[in-house]
Amino acid sequence: MPEQAVKQSHDIEALMMTIGAQAKTASRPLSIANADQKNRALLAMASAIEASTSKILDSNARDVAAAETAGVAASFIDRLKLDNARISGIAEGIRSIAALADPVGEVIAAWDRPNGLKIERVRTPLGVIGVIYESRPNVTADAGALCLKAGNAVILRGGSDSQYSSRAIHACLVEGLKMAGLPEHAIQLVPLTDRAAVGSLLGGLGGTVDVIVPRGGKSLVARVQSEARVPVFAHLEGICHIYVDKSADIDMARAIVLNSKMRRTGICGSAETLLVDAAAVSTHLHPLVKILIDGGCEVRGSQAVLDAVDGVRAATEEDWRTEYLDAIISVSVVDGIDGAIGHIGKYSSNHTEAVIAEDTEVVERFFNEIDSAILLHNASTQFADGGEFGMGAEIGIATGKMHARGPVGVEQLTSFKYRVHGTGQTRA
């Protein structure tokens, strides 16, 4: 390695270690900050974002222009681009987090032992959270606000594609911290786009980082899961399915299928595969495929779909394993709920699945036998979102089975400890 590169690498490592130490120091007063102080900071952040709308839009325009010059996909641009409505939504999201109950100190459970000991399980902050994300500048605000509400310090590492937008939003978050008298290092944005900074963060920064949350494409999440030396809350892919049963109301099904795929194609809750009950081919398949095609969606179908509907491309084995994040969907005919469960079990990424049915036995089997993080009945997969769950916002969706699963909101950003009260008991 050239001498200059070695020096730069050491400089990056030193900077990241400093950021980690600052976050650890900030986490201590943050963990005992009361709800009023945290909420004052959050409300000040929301006001600062609204007041800085023009500056944020100008910064975002630089990011979007660079992305367009690079020729990235339209779905990527959609995730990156901000407008007045989206900035207002970011501010309102922070206010909704402020309105949530403070999870820190909540007694989750309490019980008495025969020997008179009184035991409580109590929520506590995780400590320092590292968030690594791409393209979505709103994550800067969502992650910063959620971590603060849960009493955690956070280190944000956005992608180079959204660097100017993220910096403008981060400045508003720091302004809110200062106004509430909280340490400004409670929410830090890594000022580097060098990939070496990600490697340092994944290493845990000398034991200062407690959890890593990645938000981005498959390659980013795969790297994080492979290299992280601390626990990770994440999902690798969002291969989300909709199963339409023969008992489904066709008008409801048409509306849900179209919304699930086409409302926003580039989010992880967008439907990627539609499964239709073989018993409903004559009544449901054609109208469902037609509404997708008419809505601008490319449909790739199994042979049964090709035989029944014009304008469909043949699906390959790879299609059933693909998260398109685009206006493309794969469609197959399955043998009822058994076929749907079998297909989802084989190809699902365990993120989100939906069933459209009026038959309660079908719904019960779908809910009981499919082990994805989020299951919906007669509702769009695009509701796979912490804000829509009433969590104010989310830091991401986790598909693992340890600690956090599904939308990761303020409660999922806490751990717990036990408090044991005695009256002089000793153990025999």
Image: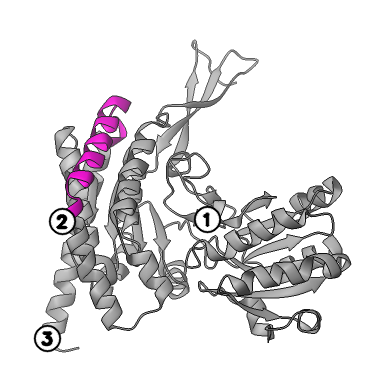
Q: Percent from the top left, x then y, of residue 230?
A: 41, 58
Mark 2 residue element: helix
Instruction: Between residue 294 and residue 29, name the one nearer to us.
Output: 294
Residue at image location 34% in from the left, 53% down from the top: 86
From the image, tell me which residue sits under label 1: 398
Mark 2 or mark 3, whichever is nearer to me: 2
From the image, tell me which residue sits under label 2: 55
View extreme (right): residue: 279
From the image, tell me which residue sits under label 3: 3
State yes or no: discs 2 and 3 in contact (Cβ < 8 Å). Answer: no
Q: Percent from the top left, x then y, of residue 255?
A: 64, 57
Instruction: Between residue 370 and residue 375, name the one nearer to us.
Output: 375
Q: Amino acid at mark 2?
A: Lys
Within-10-Å neighbours for mark 3: few <14, some 14–19, many 20+: few
Q: Give the answer, above or below, for where 79 lies relative to 407.
A: below
Q: Amino acid at mark 3?
A: Glu
The residues colored magenta run 30-55
Query: How far is the residue under mark 2 from the one under mark 1?
Result: 33 Å
Q: Percent from the top left, x then y, of residue 229?
A: 40, 63
Query: How far is the residue under mark 1 from the one under mark 3?
Result: 41 Å
Sequence-wise first label, 2 or 1: 2
Mark 1 or mark 3, whichever is nearer to me: 1
Instruction: Between residue 274 and residue 306, name the one nearer to us.
Output: 306
Query: How far is the residue under mark 2 from the one under mark 3?
Result: 39 Å
View extreme (bottom): residue: 2
Q: Percent from the top left, x then y, of residue 36?
A: 28, 25
